[in-house]
Amino acid sequence: MDDGSTFEVRRFIPESTVVEDFRILAQARYRAFERCPICLDEDPTSAEHVPPRGLGGVVLTATCMRCNNELGSRLENDLQDWFDDAVHVRFASDAVRGSRRTPRLLVRQNQNGSPVFMMDRGRIDPEVQRMLEAGERFEIVATETDPRRARLGALKSAYLASCVFLDAIPESTLAGEIRRLLVQTRDAARTEPIEASPIIDNLNIGRSYAEGEPVVELLARETGDGRAEAAISLARTVVVSWPLEPLGVRIEHVDPGGGTP
Ligand SMILES: [Zn+2]
């Protein structure tokens, strides 16, 4: 601060925070298919980042232009906002007619645990600047978002990564239903709410803070009854439960000396 003091801001750490201990089973390498893995159109030519670029994604496969662009513009911002703990707001004050939009606000906390809103990069309306500097009473109105949109964005990336790991576009009923949800969203109006679906609502998504290269990895951990639960780490930023049928993997005991898990 101007007076030499420091103002410490950090991410909110939700009470539900858990550290998941997964093992890495495989790392994804670029794999394209003869059809778009989402809509099954022939000859996909659009380089697809998994996860989206803003979350550290790299080109992992190819989709068709429509699936890449139209789905990206409908889902990626919400996934990014979820990851960043960001909200979209308008400022309103008695001194200004109408409300004014600002760059999105990042929700953080200070050292005492009180909430702090940080304005993200972008142009600030001079009227908002004036409201803040004048210390006038103002109102912040947050835009309601569709909570399924971010989850469907994560599902899209996890599904594409799964195709790469399986080395095929799966033909199961579940895979077909995921594709139907994605194509339906791609073709719907931007403001259309996402259809309720247990596939979307039961998907486990989490943030990862693992360090290292932004690779896409297949993870697994023991569930306690000898079986394994699989998940996909997307560029070490987002972790999503394996969205398709159980993989049927079993984790063998590995000597601390090494070996392949
Ligand atoms: Zn497509």
Image (tube, helix red, strand yellow):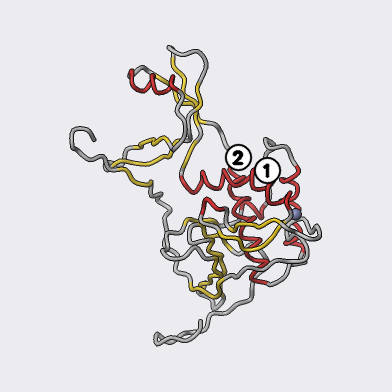
Residue 113 appears in the picture as rendered: yes
Residue 179 appears in the picture as rendered: no
The N terminus lies in which quarter of the figure?
top left
Q: What distance separates the C-alpha of mark 1 from that of mark 2?
A: 7 Å
Q: Which of the four quarters of the rendered structure image does ligand 1 lie in?
A: bottom right
98 relative position to 2: left or right = right
Return the x and y of residue 122 as percentages of the image width and height. 47, 34
- Residue furthest right in the image: 42
Picture quadrant where residue 27 is located: bottom right
Other-residue count near label 1 (Cα within 10 Å), few / some / many at <14 / 14–19 / ≥20 = some
Point out the tag, 1 or 2, that comes first from the N-terminus: 2
Picture quadrant where residue 190 is located: top right
Which label number is shown at residue 207?
Answer: none
Return the x and y of residue 101 as percentages of the image width and height. 51, 26
Q: Residue at x 44, y 37 (%)?
A: 121
On whether ligand 1 comes within 8 Å of the CB at mark 1, the answer is no
User: Considering the numbered disc 1 on the image, is that residue within a helix, a strand or a loop?
Assistant: loop
Q: Nearer the viewer, residue 102 or 65?
A: 65
Three-letter code, disc 1: Ile
Three-letter code, disc 2: Asp
Q: Residue at x 52, y 60 (%)?
A: 239
Q: Is residue 136 above or below residue 197?
A: above
Other-residue count near label 2 (Cα within 10 Å), few / some / many at <14 / 14–19 / ≥20 = few
Q: Residue at x 51, y 53 (%)?
A: 55
197 relative position to 52: left or right = right
Residue that mark 2 sits on: 146
Disc 1 to disc 2: CB gap under 8 Å: yes
Q: Residue at x 47, y 56 (%)?
A: 207
Residue that mark 1 sits on: 194
119 relative position to 73: left or right = left
Return the x and y of residue 111 as percentages of the image width and height. 27, 43
Picture quadrant where residue 140 is located: top left
